[in-house]
Amino acid sequence: MAGAAKWVLAGSAVLVLAVGGEAFYLHHRNAVDAAGPAAGPAYKTDPDDEVFVKAEHPMSVKDEKDLKGRTLWVSAGGQMDYYPFTGGKIDFKSAGVLLGAEPIVVKDAVEQVAPARTAIRMPAGDKQVFLIFNHGSDPQEYATPVGYKQNGDYTFLTDQIYFYDDPHKLYSYWGPAVWKAIDEHRAEPGMTEREVQMALGQVSSPHGDNPGDRTVTFDDQGHPKNVTFVNGKSTKVEDVKP
């Protein structure tokens, strides 16, 4: 996962969501700052930065189709809408938003022209590329975008949107209490910013430049919460009053 100061992929035009007049960008998980401080106290390594997060660098629709039968886990929580897929067609009425660490089972990948109104977090391009998947125990198939085609060229964001390995195992040292809160999409005192982000989603607005010592407003699917962090841990979780 990214170093705490580099959670925002500011150079990308994709996966952008405006909330409260601000723009929020897809979490970049693997940008680790290799240069420690030149002087002063010894650099304290964040164990999250040492976790190997797999990337598969898909280049084609075939690469996406080759994911059939595999389980992926959502990394870009709170970012990607998913839509019912029936009879080989996508019904572009959102069925929900994929949440952090949730598993999906890939059934196929398809290309389809997406309405401009749905191109909030992924450019519409000439066509979008969608993963077809099952969600939990629901037998209904769903579709969610993982890339787009523009002027004959494909761009895929699968590596940024999903984990290929179960994050519950990658970050098992977070402990069962934290993972229970994440799986229930709750923020609790004692959690780090990364843990809260996994629980409440990546749509957030930080108030301050020092990760771990600031307040962050998380959109939390339209139910915003202010989470205050002191010395790297959350100390207060409050609903934002209308």
Image (tube, rainbow, N blue to C red):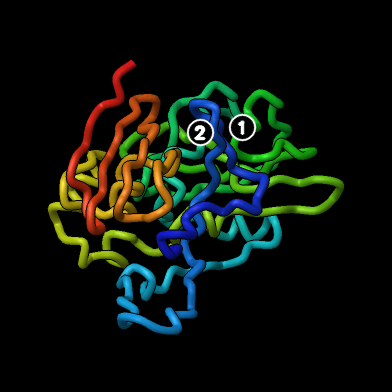
Location of mark 1 (residue): 120
Residue 134 visible within the image? no
Numbered mark located on residue 81 in the image = 2
For the residues labelled 1 and 2, the Cα–Cα distance comes to: 9 Å
Q: Residues within 10 Å of mark 2 (few under 14, many from 20)?
A: many
The quarter in which the C terminus is drawn is top left
Q: Percent from the top left, x then y, of residue 129?
A: 66, 44
Q: Secondary structure at mark 1?
A: loop
The reply to whether discs 1 and 2 touch (Cβ–Cβ < 8 Å) is yes
Residue depicted at 49% across the width and 59% down the height? 6
15 vs 31: above or below: above
Residue depicted at 27% across the width and 60% down the height? 168
25 vs 119: above or below: below
Q: Percent from the top left, x then y, of residue 72?
A: 43, 55
The quarter in which the N terminus is drawn is bottom left
Task: Give left or right: position of 137 versus 70.
Answer: left
